[in-house]
Amino acid sequence: MNTPHQSASVHPARLSPEELWGQCEVEFLRRSGPGGQHRNKVETAVRLRHRPSGIVVQAARWRHQAQNRREALRLLRLQLALQVRTSPPLTQPPSPLWKNRCRQGKLLINPNHEDFPALLAEALDHLAVRDWDVAGTAKHLGITTSQLVKLLKHEPQALALVNRERKSRGLGPLK
């Protein structure tokens, strides 16, 4: 998997919906399947191509374009979190969003919440600059190691990414 790096301090998964839409080529498509005649005749599916990263996502699950637009944006944010690394300085503290979600060493986030991709991106960025050291990254982010692993487990692709990077450095996998 290609992991583009960005020098900007704001990860693209944290951009406002308007800013993110502005960086995308948007296509509306017809899709067959459940949903009947409406779905077969109306362009309800949404495909986004994020120009800066080249990441493409598609949402066609819903019968209504507005729902698929929201889903496509959520999928894009998640893929950006997984595939794009920014390089925060080692001394950079966690973001206000991160701090707002932390309580006594625990990270409070539902994987379906709109903030999840931004928090996942932040965790992965800090892991990358710390050479995938989970304990050190968790300490820096103000959470327990088990909370960081739990965050990664909410998105299996993130856990697989971390384990690939750890393996390439001779580190044991997270379970």
Image: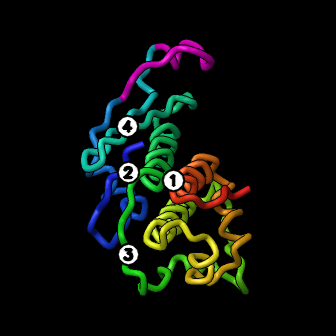
47 or 107: nearer the eye? 107
Do labels 1 and 3 touch, CB within 8 Å? no
Q: Secondary structure at mark 3?
A: loop
Look at label 1 and name its amino acid. Answer: Ser
Within 10 Å of disc 4 (Cα), the crowding (few <14, some 14-19, many 20+) is some
Q: Secondary structure at mark 4?
A: strand
Do labels 4 and 1 touch, CB within 8 Å? no
Earlier in the chain: of badge 1 and badge 3, it is 3
Q: Residue at x 31, y 59 (%)?
A: 5
According to the picture, the residue beneath numbered tag 2 turns out to be 3
* Measured Cα–Cα span from mark 4 to mark 1: 27 Å
| Residue 29 painted magenta | yes
Look at label 4 and name its amino acid. Answer: Val
In this picture, which residue range is highlighted in magenta?
A: 28-40
Earlier in the chain: of badge 3 and badge 2, it is 2
According to the picture, the residue beneath numbered tag 3 turns out to be 88
Compared with 123, 90 (above or below) is below
Kindly indicate the quadrant of the structure image that contains residue 84: bottom left
Within 10 Å of disc 1 (Cα), the crowding (few <14, some 14-19, many 20+) is few
* Measured Cα–Cα span from mark 1 to mark 2: 15 Å
Do labels 1 and 2 touch, CB within 8 Å? no
According to the picture, the residue beneath numbered tag 1 turns out to be 168
Earlier in the chain: of badge 4 and badge 1, it is 4
Residue 143: where, in percent of width, then height? 66, 79
Q: Residue at x 30, y 48 (%)?
A: 53
| Residue 108 painted magenta | no
Earlier in the chain: of badge 1 and badge 2, it is 2
Colouring of the image? rainbow
Which mark lies nearer to you, 4 or 2? Answer: 2
Q: Residue at x 42, y 64 (%)?
A: 14
Whether residue 146 sits left or right of residue 19 in the image: it is: right
